[in-house]
Amino acid sequence: MKNIVILISGGGSNMAAIVKTAQREDWPTRYGARVAAVISNRAQAAGLQFAREQGLATAVLDHKAFATREAFDAELMATIDRHDPAGRPALVVLAGFMRILTPAFVEHYAGRLINIHPSLLPAFTGLHTHQRAIEAGCKFAGVTVHEVTAELDHGPILAQAVVPVLPQDDADTLAARVLTQEHLIYPRAIASLLSTK
Ligand code: GAR
């Protein structure tokens, strides 16, 4: 079985969309794949509750308990890899995981690490993407699923979706419109990857 490990920091709505799609489309039968675990760096992340209710393995690793980024990432790698019998999950999925990862982490999961970012990359890397798109006068905004490489919010683009920016939008209304698309394209991009792995 190809194991997918999902990392979250907050609401976990993308993680929930992936888990529900995996159930609906029967990924174990179709791709020989399953969501093996959900890991959060915040104990309060609302998504953990959903994951537990689904009977998924969960883990919390609080980054504040580690002296360095390197130490946190080393423990995170060990925690992720424990959720695969061979210590090598097929896919590590960042779903609203709000941590900058070390080169060692990115290298360890090279070719198996993907992220969703709420902008049309390469525009608006980093934070506050929706506010920045509005302030720039963009008529369209969107979301990108990409492979993670050493440079933040770069790496080969796997999928994108576009939404209009409406005159009355603020960052919250735009974020909500984009999030609806995130929930469609992230599971689809993962399924597409699984079919080729
Ligand atoms: C999503 O909009 C995701 O694109 C964004 O955080 C949100 C998480 O929502 N990710 C980033 O900004 C990464 N830099 P969720 O926890 O409900 O999936």
Image (tube, grey):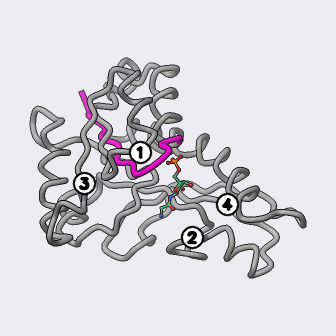
What residue is pinned by disc 4? 142
What residue is pinned by disc 3? 62
Q: Earlier in the sequence, mark 1 or mark 3?
A: 1
Residue 43 image offset from top left, x and y in percent: 32, 45
Determine if the magenta segment contains residue 76: no
Quadrant (top left, top right, bottom left, bottom right) of the C terminus = top left
Looking at the image, is mark 2 or mark 3 nearer the viewer? Answer: 3
The magenta span reads 1-13
Judge left or right: residue 141 versus residue 74: right
Residue 91 image offset from top left, x and y in percent: 30, 45
Q: Earlier in the sequence, mark 2 or mark 4?
A: 2
Judge left or right: residue 119 versus residue 136: left
What residue is pinned by disc 2? 121
Q: Is residue 159 above or below residue 71?
A: above
Q: CA distance from mark 1 to mark 3?
A: 11 Å
Disc marking residue 53: none
Q: Residues within 10 Å of mark 2 (few under 14, many from 20)?
A: some
- Callout 4 amino acid: Gly
State yes or no: Cβ of the residue under disc 3 lies below 8 Å from any atom of ligand 1: no
- Callout 2 amino acid: Leu
Tell me which residue sits at (59%, 71%) in the image: 128
Quadrant (top left, top right, bottom left, bottom right) of the N terminus = top left
In the image as oriented, which residue stretches furthest toward the right?
167
Find numbered disc 3 in the image and state the secondary structure of the residue it sits on.
Answer: loop
What residue is pinned by disc 1? 45
Find numbered disc 1 in the image and state the secondary structure of the residue it sits on.
Answer: loop
Q: Nearer the viewer, residue 180 or 31?
A: 180
Mark 4 vs 3: CB contact within 8 A: no
Find numbered disc 4 in the image and state the secondary structure of the residue it sits on.
Answer: strand
Q: Earlier in the sequence, mark 2 or mark 3?
A: 3
- Callout 3 amino acid: Asp
